[in-house]
């Protein structure tokens, strides 16, 4: 603000512009005068004891299950996330989509088989360890709630690292239960665990 000749107590940075005292200048003008340096401090203290610091998400999944063969197909997936201010919407959305895809794989196909007699992984490569491919992943949608968290950090943002995967497998299992009436509690939910319990 000093470099731009702006003063006042109502200083704010919005949309790439610095505003103060009824005046507005592009931040680019300040950068043209040389390197910009900013400092801030963060003290963690006992915030985690006084405030909820976690991110939150709800996952919704729609599946179709073939009544004759028990084959499962995911049709739609939705994640609604509360993660404070989203600094980079594109990267955050991609992170959530990746987690949703991993959750679908964990629910329906990923099964690491261990030979307990000889102590090795039987399916130790992608020839034997199944993961989702494009045909397995349907329409996915991510919604970030418009919120900020003034207690989490000076940027009022939180991380979205594991937010996309936590709860996805459970949502898939619940969708299968809603479609078939069969509750399977052993991941991955494969045909052999489902077909014998389907009613004719």
Image (cartoon, rainbow, N blue to C red):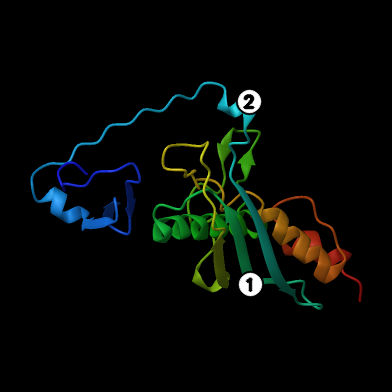
Q: Residue furthest right?
A: 200
Q: In this rendering, would 57 be left or right of 124? A: right
- Which quadrant does the N terminus fall into? top left
Q: Position of residue 4 (x, y in %)?
A: 16, 48
Question: Mark 2 — residue?
Answer: 49
The answer, for residue 189, to whether it is visible in the render is: no
Q: In this rendering, would 6 be left or right of 72? A: left
Q: Position of residue 158 (x, y in %)?
A: 49, 43
Q: Earlier in the sequence, mark 1 or mark 2?
A: 2
Q: In this rendering, would 154 be left or right of 177? A: left
- 1 or 2: mark nearer the eye: 2
From this view, report whether residue 10 is shown above or below residue 74: above
Q: Position of residue 148 (x, y in %)?
A: 52, 48
Of helix, strand and loop, which one carries label 2? helix
- Which quadrant does the C terminus fall into? bottom right
Q: Residue furthest left?
A: 33
Q: Which residue occupies 36% across, 28% down? A: 41
Question: Mark 1 — residue?
Answer: 76
């Amino acid at each position: 603000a000093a470099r731009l000749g702006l003063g006042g107590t109502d200083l704010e940075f919005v949309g790439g512009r610095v505003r103060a005292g009824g005046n507005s200048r592009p931040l680019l003008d300040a950068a043209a005068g040389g390197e910009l340096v900013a400092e801030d401090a963060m003290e963690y203290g006992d915030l985690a004891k006084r405030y909820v610091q976690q991110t939150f998400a709800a996952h919704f999944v729609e599946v179709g299950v073939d009544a004759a063969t028990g084959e499962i197909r995911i049709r739609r997936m939705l994640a609604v996330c509360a993660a404070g201010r989203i600094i980079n919407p594109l990267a955050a959305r991609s992170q959530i989509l990746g987690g949703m895809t991993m959750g679908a794989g964990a629910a329906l196909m990923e099964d690491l088989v261990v030979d307990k007699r000889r102590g090795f992984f039987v399916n130790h490569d992608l020839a034997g360890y199944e993961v989702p491919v494009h045909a397995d992943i349907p329409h996915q949608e991510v919604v970030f709630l418009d919120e900020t968290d003034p207690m989490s950090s000076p940027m009022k943002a939180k991380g979205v690292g594991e937010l996309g995967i936590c709860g996805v497998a459970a949502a898939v299992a619940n969708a299968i239960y809603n479609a078939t009436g069969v509750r399977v509690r052993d991941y991955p939910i494969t045909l052999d665990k489902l077909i014998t319990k389907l009613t004719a």
